[in-house]
Image: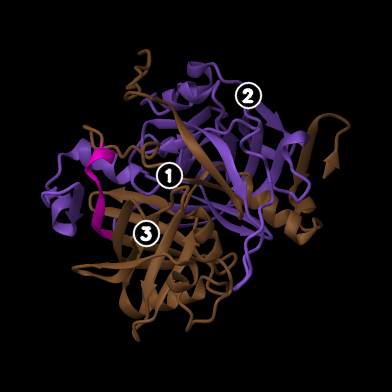
Chain colours: A purple, B brown
């Protein structure tokens, strides 16, 4: 950290390599903002169920609906990736305040033979047409099929793109214009590798146009 | 929407195409969870400054530090992408409650000759070694250089990976273990295309191990 003598901490490219590893991991993972938190459910060809917490889900397209996520194939994510490759199927399951501790616990290094569903007490549920298991406790259940993947050249992580083939949620969570009320769903957000936050509405804002005042939608 | 007669809304792959376009956009963009909100600052070869709001930033690696984002090259994002290709430089700037309205306003379809800094009143600031402009009002300022990009085959969007070459934030926001306190930073989260939320701490949880109870870090 370059101490400028003031209130600011400044890090330049050459500073990151010298940081203590866990400090750097915490810093870099938390700085870009509040992240989406999902439990990813998969199933091996032998039927063994796997559940893993991810905070790297991102929007890729709405028509048809595609979502992306980052997988580190050398980490605890590897069972998730093996199963997605084997079956082409995976699920995203929302995390509320009553299950974020179980969600975090899925990041422990269990053996492949151990099911994180069983170890954490979360309920595996199945839906017609989706091979991978959903989390019964999750208010928003998304089923995907593997569409494509890309290995990032600079560090070997995988960017995985899936097509949404199933969506299930409480009717009351869908606002009249289609937006999901994630505040009403008590959706938990993620900070870094171990932080969990609740959210509250500030506002929804109408379509922005040059030289027009913004309209609040709430 | 498949009315199952109960409290659940269920959509299957074949249902999404038939949804009204804006309804589908809202639904698909909001369902995956709370997203990171950042202003992306760029500068053209002619020096013209551009600022655009993004909620598709994701973690790719910590050592060296890499971040990813999704760019739709046919949308208002195109000026951002043109500038990144021209200069190899871009910045991510955090959004607090005092500037989320200006952040949203940058999504208006301004001409390339119009600077979103000027149009929204946000301050463009420069730092040694980073070509692209930062947002003066942002508490967390991240400078990146373009590392690689990948065009998603299924719908043509770009996945852009950048290397973090600069990080500036208030010293008081960095906790002793390196994690950035995004709650203290009043970091605003994003829902869908137009929703803004405040966040509050639920907890931080220690490293998870099989058969060990989780430890709260707060």
In-image side of A167 versus A161 (left or right):
right
Quadrant of the snapshot with the C terminus of chain B = top left
Q: Nearer the viewer, residue A55 or A200?
A: A200
Look at mark 1 in the image and give the residue it sits on. B187
Q: Residue furthest right?
A: B5
The part of the image, by quadrant, that contains residue B80 is bottom left
In-image side of A189 versus B185 (left or right):
right
Name the residue: 39% across, 24% down: A111
Q: Nearer the viewer, residue B50 or A50?
A: B50
Q: In the image, which is nearer the foreground, mark 1 or mark 3? A: 1
Look at mark 3 in the image and give the residue it sits on. B92
Principal SS element in the magenta part?
strand
Q: Secondary structure at mark 2?
A: loop
In-image side of B142 versus A19 (left or right):
right
Give the crowd class for mark 2: few <14, some 14-19, many >=20 residues within 10 Å: some
Badge count? 3
Residues shaded magenta: B164-174
- In this rendering, is residue B146 above or below A160? below
Q: Specify whether residue A115 is in view.
A: no
Where residue A38 sits in the image (x, y, percent)? 53, 37
Q: Magenta stretch containing residue A151, yes or no?
A: no
Q: Chain of mark 1?
A: B
Q: CA distance from mark 1 to mark 3?
A: 13 Å
Name the residue: 30% across, 57% down: B142
Q: Specify whether residue A209 is in view.
A: yes
Q: In the image, which is nearer the foreground, mark 2 or mark 1? A: 1
Q: Chain of mark 2?
A: A
Look at mark 2 in the image and give the residue it sits on. A137
């Amino acid at each position: 950290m370059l101490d400028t003598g003031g209130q600011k901490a400044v890090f330049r490219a050459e500073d990151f390599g010298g940081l203590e590893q866990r400090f750097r991991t915490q810093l870099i993972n938390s700085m870009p903002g509040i992240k989406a938190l999902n439990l990813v459910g998969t199933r091996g060809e032998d039927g063994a169920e796997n559940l893993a917490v991810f905070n790297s889900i991102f929007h890729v397209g709405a028509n048809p609906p595609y979502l992306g996520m980052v997988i580190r194939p050398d980490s605890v994510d590897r069972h998730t990736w093996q199963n997605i490759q084997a079956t082409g199927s995976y699920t995203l399951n929302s995390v509320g305040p009553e299950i974020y501790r179980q969600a975090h616990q899925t990041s422990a290094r269990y053996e492949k033979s151990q099911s994180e569903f069983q170890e954490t007490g979360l309920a595996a549920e199945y839906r017609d047409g989706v091979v991978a298991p959903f989390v019964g406790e999750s208010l928003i259940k998304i089923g995907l099929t593997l569409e494509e993947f890309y290995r990032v050249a600079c560090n070997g992580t995988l960017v995985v793109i899936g097509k949404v083939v199933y969506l299930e949620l409480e009717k009351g969570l869908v606002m009249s214009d289609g937006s999901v009320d994630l505040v009403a769903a008590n959706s938990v957000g993620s900070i870094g590798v171990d932080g969990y936050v609740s959210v509250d509405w500030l506002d929804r804002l109408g379509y922005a146009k040059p030289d027009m005042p913004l309209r609040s939608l709430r």
